[in-house]
Image (cartoon, rainbow, N blue to C red):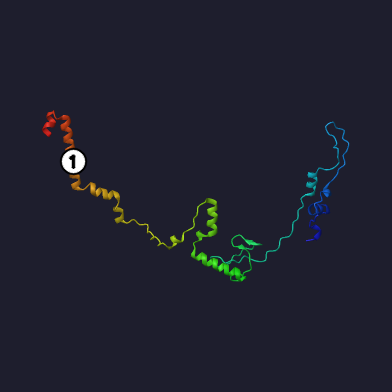
Amino acid sequence: MESATIPTLTEDEIKYFFHDDSECIKRTFIQHDVQNFFVRPTEKNDVPESLNYSILMRKRTFVNELPAIKWKCRAPLGNGKLCERMDRYKCPFHGRIIARNEQGQAVDEKIRIQEEEQLAKKRTTPEWQDPEMLEDIRLATGIDLRMNEENKKKKKKKKESGLTELGIEENTVRKRLEKKLFNRSSLKRIGAALDRDERRRNEEKFHHQFNYACNN
């Protein structure tokens, strides 16, 4: 790109911003005689200071050519392939684009060691336990979803088959109560108690009647 198209600071701008010279931005204007009752000329021909600053801070657009894209991301994917995205500085999925070999390993030894350590850590930690993701969730909702180390050591619960076991289905509270209440001896005992209460009630209320006297 030609140097003539690149915007540069004027002498007044250099004096104002770098040498604190406020006199350099002062402007004047010529007032014409206006034959109008409502419009009158001002006493001074100086432009207001706020307007001088606005004139100085005019907008200048500079469009430069972006550097060409040379490298692919080439970060290793889960299916064994390499990322084929061609971004200028940063891959939206794998971060900053760095130099990698044909196997997707970082050329820089320090970065390669860090990636290997992170990969080994991910193998032992489930994906939903990603520390960065859990921290974002905690800041957004206030809920901490991190899994304690003690819970990891606990024995895993036996996986259920989803089938209904008839033996367990029969051993319910209702079944146990039915066995006790509807037992033959229990029914006889309850029936005798109800008959005894009925006779006592009839004797108290209807003992003078012939019908109840014969029944008792």
Quarter containing the C terminus: top left
Q: Is residue 170 left or right of residue 123?
A: left
For the point 21% across and 48% down, the residue is 183
Task: State the image coordinates of residue 102 (x, y, percent, origin top left).
Answer: 60, 71
x then y, percent, for residue 30: 88, 41
Q: Residue at x 60, y 69 (%)?
A: 110
- Find the residue positioned furthest to the front: 20
- The amino acid marked with disc number 1 is Ala
Q: Quadrant of the N terminus?
A: bottom right
- Residue drawn at point x = 13 percent, y = 31 percent: 212
Q: Residue 36, relative to residue 54: is it above or below?
A: above
Residue in view at x 23 percent, y 48 percent? 180
Which element carries disc 1, helix, strand or loop?
Answer: helix
Q: Which residue is mark 1?
A: 193
Query: Does the rendering let one see residue 186?
Result: yes
- In this rendering, the count of numbered labels is 1
For label 1, count other residues whose C-alpha is less than 10 Å away and answer few (under 14), some (14-19) or many (20+).
few
Q: Where does residue 155 sit, x and y in percent of width and height? A: 40, 62
- Residue furthest to the right in view is 33
The answer to whether one can see residue 101 in this image is no
Residue at the outermost left position: 214
Of the pair 74 and 19, the residue shown nearer to us? 19
179 in relation to 98, above or below: above
Q: Is residue 33 left or right of residue 88?
A: right
Q: Is residue 136 above or below residue 124?
A: above
